[in-house]
């Protein structure tokens, strides 16, 4: 299954036009003028492609594998000491296993559909 991505909208691309031009001008100004013409063409092409991918490319959608009830004890665990930490650790481990099983079940159900 391919990862889900978001393509930028036309309005987002229009808004980033100036940023792209500035970024590209910096990248192109770094090219050594004494290089061979073919090599210079390859460098320019490479810089255009990498610049456009970086500023205008797809953005991967980040889906958390853990539910918010699981993330809450993890956050509390970061700010606690000894005995309470051990209790939160048990709760967190159980919640992570439960979330993993739920995620696997959902993926199987999607594959069946």
Image (spheres, grey):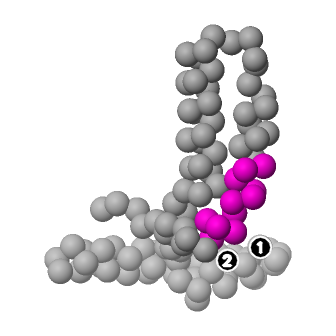
Q: Which mark is residue 104?
A: none
Residue appearing at x 42%, y 74% in the figure: 100
How packed is label 2: few (under 14 Cα within 10 Å), some, or many (20 or more)? some
Position of the C terminus, as image quadrant, is: bottom left
Residue appearing at x 55%, y 56% in the figure: 57
Quarter of the image for residue 26 reads top right
Depth order, front residue of 74/23 = 23
Depth order, front residue of 91/75 = 75
The answer to whether residue 39 is magenta is: no
Q: Report the residue that reaches farthest toward the front.
A: 37
Q: Give the SS element for disc 2.
A: helix
Residue 1, percent from left and from top: 30, 62
Residue 7, percent from left and from top: 49, 66
Residue 61, percent from left and from top: 51, 69
Q: Report the residue that reaches farthest toward the left.
A: 112
Magenta span of residues? 12-22
Q: Which mark is residue 74?
A: 2
Q: Is label 1 in contact with label 2 (beta carbons under 8 Å)?
A: yes
Q: Is residue 38 above or below residue 52?
A: above
């Amino acid at each position: 299954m391919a990862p889900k991505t978001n393509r930028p909208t036309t309005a987002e691309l229009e808004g980033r036009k100036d940023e792209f031009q500035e970024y590209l001008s910096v990248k192109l100004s770094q090219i050594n003028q004494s290089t061979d013409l073919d090599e210079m063409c390859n460098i320019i092409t490479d810089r255009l492609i990498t610049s456009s991918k970086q500023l205008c490319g797809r953005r991967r959608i980040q889906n958390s594998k853990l539910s918010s009830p699981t993330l809450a004890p993890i956050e509390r665990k970061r700010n606690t000491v000894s005995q309470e930490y051990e209790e939160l650790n048990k709760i967190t481990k159980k919640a992570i296993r439960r979330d993993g099983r739920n995620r696997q079940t959902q993926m199987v159900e999607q594959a069946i559909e």
